Amino acid sequence: MTGEKECTESMGIQVGFFGIEKYELLLYLSRIIRQLGKRVLLVDYSENGALSAGIPVWDQFGDQIPDGVVAESEDYHAAVDYCGIHFVRDILLNQSVKEQYDCILIDFGFGVDHRAAESCSRVVLVSDQQLHNIHRLKHPEVWDGLPVYAVLKDLCPCRITPEYILEEIGVWVAPDRRFAIYQDAWDAKCRISCQYSKLSPFVRLSREYREFLKSFTREIFPEFNKSDIDRAFRLAEKGA
């Protein structure tokens, strides 16, 4: 990157997640952020609706957007309330809606050209070591000028290193914004449970996974100290 654009976050922090399935990241983060007393909105713009599958109450609507929820709706209460976390799918949000939240976490799937991506103040790229996934994120002109984070997960030790993956994507990510998460059976179990159990606990996550969740939360909300973040994490991981 040549330089980061200045983030204007008067209407709240808006983070775009791009890449392979990452629904558990957004679900875990939203629960931690809620425990900090912040208002958080989850948005699913992904191709496969993986994040939607992790919202147990979403099935009350099925695939139909309820009456009164339209692309430019100013009634943010029309969002699904998921234990204090709000959720919408395939709905473009106007400024008055965004202003109701302290943090908006968006799953774009691989939709790098989605019109809502232009409003993001931070970007998280999520990939594994598979070449077809890496190449789908190869859009350096999109990431240029934004604070970029990388979560490289489900890794196995081999010559395809995190450095190689980022080089292939064509993006430079600061070392303290790179998170390498290696294959872990318990991480996988917690991820799958997210789609079947309401507020599924995520205790015993791998150290690398916990590091990302805590570090990223601290990054977007620097007013909270380590003790605040640790407490919020403990409450969220137990299913609160």
Image (spheres, rainbow, N blue to C red):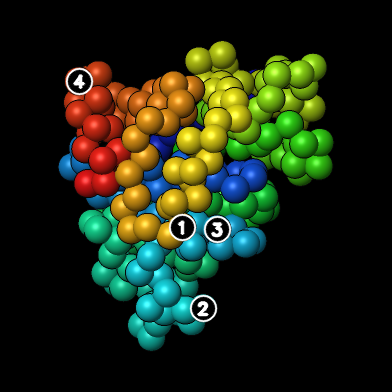
User: Spatial distance from mark 4 to mark 1, Cα to Cα?
Assistant: 30 Å
User: What secondary structure is marked by label 3?
Assistant: helix
To which residue does mark 2 refer? 63
- The image quadrant that residue 173 belongs to is top right
- Residue drawn at x 33%, y 58% as measured from the top left: 198
Q: How far from the left and from the top, in percent, is residue 235? A: 21, 37
User: Spatial distance from mark 1 to mark 2, Cα to Cα?
Assistant: 16 Å
To which residue does mark 1 refer? 195
Q: Which mark is residue 50?
A: 3
In this image, 122 relative to 66: left or right?
right
Q: How far from the left and from the top, in percent, is residue 134? A: 75, 36
The answer to whether residue 34 is seen in the rendering is: no
Q: Residues within 10 Å of mark 1 (few under 14, many from 20)?
A: some
- Residue drawn at x 46%, y 57% as measured from the top left: 195
- Disc 1 marks which amino acid? Gln
Q: Residues within 10 Å of mark 3 (few under 14, many from 20)?
A: some
- From this view, report whether residue 176 is shown above or below residue 86: above
To which residue does mark 4 refer? 227
Q: Nearer the viewer, residue 27 or 45?
A: 27
- The image quadrant that residue 49 belongs to is bottom right
Labels 4, 1: front one: 1
User: What secondary structure is marked by label 4?
Assistant: helix
- Residue drawn at x 76%, y 18% as measured from the top left: 158
Pointers 3 and 1 in contact (C-beta within 8 Å): yes
Labels 1, 2: front one: 1
Q: How far from the left and from the top, in percent, is residue 143? A: 64, 35
Q: Residues within 10 Å of mark 4 (few under 14, many from 20)?
A: few
User: What secondary structure is marked by label 2?
Assistant: loop
- Disc 4 marks which amino acid? Ser
Q: Nearer the viewer, residue 95 or 152?
A: 152
